[in-house]
Image (cartoon, coloured by chain):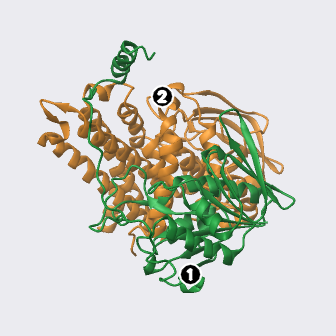
Chain colours: A orange, B green
């Protein structure tokens, strides 16, 4: 398989970059300082058909390949990490339906997600179950033709602004999370659902990270995704794909920080020369650039494997998210260093980019979980059986 | 009502314009875009189409093969089809040569309104709309902040020192519009995908019934020199200052000259 960007990819990049430079970048600082969800940019992205790229044309989407979807996220993230979460989480919330939904469920819900009329969110994590997904406690009790959901979720990105949630709950608590969990589509105007609070965060401050409560929330069995007990599998299959969105976001954040560093270093003068003339700075910029490019290329290689439905998909997507997240943190930290004192103040964007980058090492599977996934695949290939 | 929007592909604004040895614009050296002032003409045409006042919007451009990209970009914003007039004999054409070719192409396309931006970002002659109208012997409605059509008449709203005038003429007309039209739309992703399937034709001089002789070498004017302006008066440069400090210094400078 080849995965060099095509002319179409380059055109998409140019179009999104123009939009990002003209309409998104100017809003980034304000979104960060106010912590408000950028509804105007969500409408703009929806209007430009940029929230429907992972959906089929029959549902009103544009069915772009995964590299193109990555480029879209990258270019938005270069301008603003918060705004890039809008297409990322739209896909994350929809993936359980795309992977495990019936045709009827897809026809019922996907058009409104593709058009951006509704926002989606993915509700898996609980206060006591982050990396340890299997120790989820939320319950879904069968009652006639419905399920009644009780429990709470924590750290749900866009949970307070979404109209549709894909929710994971135990239909068979005896079996535990791995075998007893099921997935459901929940419309957020269902009685008993609430988003009582959102977190105050280090970064991606305009993206609401919500606590969700379910108090006898009644969901028809027609909204269950797949069979009872398939929830864990659906969640893992979702994350195997969605984490590529985070890889692309991290690449974009790194690129934005690099671009800001180059521009500053070329302009700022000290000791009678441009800062960019100092070899020490040139070495820093070179490391930042080559590492960002490496992360980008690995992300595209993983994207190509997603489209090819490779059997070792998790190896690729976890590697990409691992490398890209660590790269974003390193590059943004170095960017603050290149800008010196000016890098520390809010007048320049790199301190925000550094705060934004940190989350890419944490959500959709911490870097530690990504390492476990890569190691498991590696050892499996080498014929080393998993521990009992 | 049929509209043809004339657009030009130009080097990106702010790019260093590089000239070839014979003092022609080196189009390969810089990123090429739709002339920004033409985007307002595109936007005006598409608004009329959205409102049902225009049945079709066609784009017309004269340029090298590369100009087809600009036409595709325009089609991505909206519209139905495009025509590129391209011929080796047109290299180095000036406003007169361009106007002659566009006039011939417009006579062949026969629109009710031939719509243009008020000037191109590279040569900035602002001559083509007037020349085309004169050559085709149709009215010119220039510098419109808005274009409206009704009952066989086209009108532009033109800003003046004291307010605005509405100037109208029976169609067919040539019209030019300014940035007062309002923000041009972005091409949506579906628009970009649809643009690839919209028809685009390429015409040569022969297709227009013109020969190189008719154009007398495509240009009546000749570029003799191109250079950057020299700094005349001593200037004070504020560099490497935080924005607030620089602004304070500028304010002091203006106040010292009683300008604020």
Residue A71's spot in the image, x, y percent? 46, 57
Residue position for label 1: B203
Other residues around mark 2 within 10 Å, as few (<14) / some (14–19) / many (≥20): some
For mark 2, name the chain: A
For mark 1, name the chain: B
User: Which residue is drawn at the image coordinates 24% and 40% (left, top)?
Assistant: A266
Q: Residue A7 carries which label?
A: none
For label 2, the SS is: loop
Left or right? Give the position of A131 relative to A283: right
Q: How many numbered discs?
A: 2
Residue A64 seen by the camera = yes
Q: Quadrant of the C terminus of chain B?
A: top left
* Residue projecting furthest to the right: B151
Left or right? Give the position of B107 relative to A235: right
Q: In this view, does A65 lie above or below A202?
A: below
Give B208 or B180, whichever is nearer the viewer.
Answer: B208
Query: For residue A335, which quarter of the picture?
Result: top left
Q: In this view, does A331 lie above or below A388?
A: above
Residue B106's spot in the image, x, y percent? 65, 72
Q: Nearer the viewer, mark 2 or mark 1?
A: 1
For label 1, the SS is: strand
Query: For residue B75, which quarter of the picture?
Result: bottom right
Give A310 or B110, whichever is nearer the viewer.
Answer: B110
Residue A165's spot in the image, x, y percent? 66, 45
Left or right? Give the position of B194 relative to A236: right
Q: Is residue A337 above or below residue A246?
A: above
Give B65 or A382, whichever is nearer the viewer.
Answer: B65
Q: Residue A201 carries which label?
A: 2
Q: In which quarter of the image is the N terminus of chain B?
A: bottom right
User: Which residue is drawn at the image coordinates 62% and 75% (left, top)?
Assistant: B105
């Amino acid at each position: 398989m080849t995965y060099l960007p095509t002319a179409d990819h380059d055109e998409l990049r140019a179009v999104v970059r123009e939009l990002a430079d003209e309409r998104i970048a100017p809003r980034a600082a304000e979104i960060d300082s106010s912590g408000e969800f950028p509804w105007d940019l969500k409408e703009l992205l929806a209007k430009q058909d940029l929230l429907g790229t992972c959906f089929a044309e029959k549902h009103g989407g544009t069915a772009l390949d995964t590299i193109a979807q990555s480029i879209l996220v990258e270019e938005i993230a270069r301008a603003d990490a918060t705004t890039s979460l809008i297409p990322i989480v739209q896909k994350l919330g929809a993936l359980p339906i795309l992977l495990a939904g019936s045709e009827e469920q897809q026809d019922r819900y996907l058009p409104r997600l593709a058009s951006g009329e509704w926002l989606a969110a993915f509700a898996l994590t609980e206060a006591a179950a982050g990396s340890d997904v299997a120790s989820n406690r939320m319950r879904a009790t069968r009652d006639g033709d419905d399920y009644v959901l009780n429990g709470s979720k924590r750290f749900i990105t866009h949970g307070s602004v979404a109209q549709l949630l894909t929710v994971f709950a135990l239909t068979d608590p005896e079996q535990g999370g791995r075998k007893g969990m099921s997935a459901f589509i929940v419309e957020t105007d269902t009685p008993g659902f609430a988003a009582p609070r959102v977190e105050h965060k280090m970064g991606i401050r305009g993206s609401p990270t919500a606590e969700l409560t379910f108090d006898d929330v009644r969901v028809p069995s027609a909204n269950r995704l797949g069979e009872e007990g398939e929830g864990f599998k659906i969640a893992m299959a979702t994350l195997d794909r969605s984490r590529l969105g985070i890889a692309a976001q991290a690449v974009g954040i790194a690129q934005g920080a690099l671009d800001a560093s180059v521009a500053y270093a070329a302009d700022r003068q000290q000791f009678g020369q441009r800062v960019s003339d100092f070899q020490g700075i040139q070495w820093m910029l070179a490391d930042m650039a080559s590492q960002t490019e490496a992360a980008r290329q690995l992300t595209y290689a993983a994207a190509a494997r997603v489209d090819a439905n490779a059997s070792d998909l998790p190896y690729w997507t976890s590697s990409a998210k691992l490398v890209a997240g660590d790269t974003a943190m390193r590059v943004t930290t170095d960017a603050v260093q290149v800008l010196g004192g000016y890098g520390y103040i809010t007048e320049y964007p790199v301190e925000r980019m550094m705060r934004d980058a940190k989350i890419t090492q944490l959500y959709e599977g911490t870097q530690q979980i990504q390492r476990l996934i890569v190691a498991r695949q590696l050892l499996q290939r080498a014929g080393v059986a998993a521990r009992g | 009502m049929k509209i043809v929007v004339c657009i030009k592909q130009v080097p990106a604004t702010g790019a260093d314009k590089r000239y070839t040895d014979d003092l022609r614009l080196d189009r390969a050296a810089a990123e090429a875009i739709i002339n920004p002032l033409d985007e307002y003409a595109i936007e005006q045409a598409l608004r009329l189409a959205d409102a049902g006042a225009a049945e079709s919007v066609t784009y017309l451009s004269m340029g090298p093969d590369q100009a087809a990209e600009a036409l595709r970009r325009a089609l991505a914003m909206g519209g139905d089809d495009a025509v590129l007039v391209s011929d080796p004999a047109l290299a180095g054409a000036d406003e007169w040569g361009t106007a002659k070719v566009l006039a011939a192409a417009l006579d062949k396309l026969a629109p009710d309104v031939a719509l243009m931006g008020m000037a191109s970002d590279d040569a900035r002659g602002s001559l083509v709309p007037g020349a085309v109208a004169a050559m085709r012997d149709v009215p010119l409605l220039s510098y419109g902040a808005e274009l409206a059509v009704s009952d066989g008449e086209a009108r532009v709203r033109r800003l003046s020192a004291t307010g605005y005038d509405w100037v109208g003429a029976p169609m067919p007309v040539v019209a030019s519009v300014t940035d007062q039209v309002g923000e041009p739309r972005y091409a949506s992703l579906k628009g970009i995908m649809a643009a690839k399937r919209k028809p685009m034709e390429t015409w040569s001089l022969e297709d227009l019934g013109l020969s190189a002789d008719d154009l007398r070498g495509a240009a009546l004017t000749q570029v003799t020199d191109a250079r950057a302006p020299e700094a005349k008066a001593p200037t004070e440069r504020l560099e490497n200052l935080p924005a607030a400090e620089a602004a304070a210094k500028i304010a002091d400078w203006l106040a010292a000259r009683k300008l604020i």
